[in-house]
Amino acid sequence: MKILHTSDLHLGKNLSEESFYDDQKYILDEITNIVKEKEINVVMIPGDIYDKSIPNIEASMMFDKFLTDLSKMNVIVLITSGNHDSNERLSFGSKIFNEFNIHIVTSYEGQIEKISINDVNFYLLPFLKPFHLKHLINEKEYEKINNSNDMMKWILNREKIDKSKKNILLAHQFVMWDGKLPEQCDSESISINNVGTLDAIDVNLLDDFDYVALGHIHKPQKIKRDTVRYSGTPLKYSFSEVNDKKSVVIIDTDNIDNIELLELKPLRNMKILRGTFEEVMNMKPSDDIIKVELEDENTIISPMEEIKQRFRNAIALVFINKYQSNSETGLKEIKEDASPYELFNLFFTEQNGREMSKEEDDYIKSIIGTLKEGE
């Protein structure tokens, strides 16, 4: 049996008001083509189908088409909800979907929902936090569940796993190994600093499963062993991911340890262009999603307008100069009666490590004068 693992589609996502609609539609079609070409039998998607709990119409229709295309190929689809999904909305029509081999699990009621296909048992566990167990156990027992690791121990202790068969778990959780947390990127809504190990599950708890299909972390990576794996997002959703290679995971139950990562080619890539304004404007035009990092020491007035003429999908601009990179000082003490000009002059000096030129000084004075006239 050939299985494809992807996750964290985040359909309906925007970045700095830039829509990913066309990119997501394109990448879902690419995944569908892979399913056809590789003769995939089962597609697993452990969570974060949508980017928001109330997805827009375009995102819902996109996912509807994706499921319809897979259903026409008689592919079995296994879906669990993630922390971005609304359980109620994602599970709408799930009983009807079951008849077409599309299984959507969004709740846990004391047993992990199991789908058996030939000699393989698939365990579908939606995103959970300890409080989701409160209605299932008595108060005294609940007090012993202090974190997600305790929660997972409690859940797995209730399962009777038949080790004579292949067992695969789908889970949208934060899994760590040997005290090391998975690598994250800026597009995720979780933070190591904020979450720490409270939400982390020790990977050793998952040893009874032949393969663990994880969702929640956007960077593709394995945890401890090749067969415990975050597929990562199918697209780059932040500039911290520019060097990541996005892929889907393909496994064959006849040789489940043989993992194949099939790289996904996006409609638009994501790039960071760095240099002086003149250097950037001499770079080859591109339709990719662009962040520009300017290294000019002198101030450039309204550079984004010109940059977007050359790179129409440029959505972010930052200034990086030697002083900003090395300075560890903040603004000096500010006088209570400082004028707007004095405040800006102080800010400019602290940011750039130099005084304003005569042209810059005249420009800011003219702006302040215009604002005063408006008052």
Image (tube, rainbow, N blue to C red):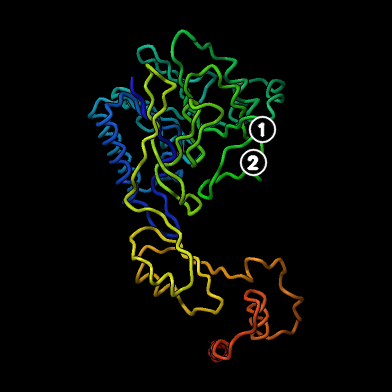
**Residue 128 falls in image quadrant:** top right
Is residue 36 toward the left or the right of residue 43 in the image?
left
Mark nearest the camera among 1 and 2 is 1
Percent of width and height locating residue 100: 28, 24
What is the tally of numbered marks visible in this picture? 2
Q: Nearer the viewer, residue 209 or 323?
A: 323
The residue labelled by disc 2 is 195
Q: Is residue 125 visible?
A: no
* Residue type, label 2: Val
- Badge 2 crowding class, 10 Å Cα cut-off, few under 14, some 14 to 19, many 20 or more, is few
Does residue 368 lie above or below 89 as drawn? below
Q: Is residue 185 visible?
A: yes
**N-terminal of the two: label 1 or label 2?**
1
Give the residue displayed 64% in from the left and 71% down from the top.
323
Does residue 143 lie above or below 369 as drawn? above
Percent of width and height locating residue 366: 54, 91
Percent of width and height locating residue 40: 30, 26
The residue labelled by disc 1 is 179
Is residue 137 toward the left or the right of residue 241 in the image?
right
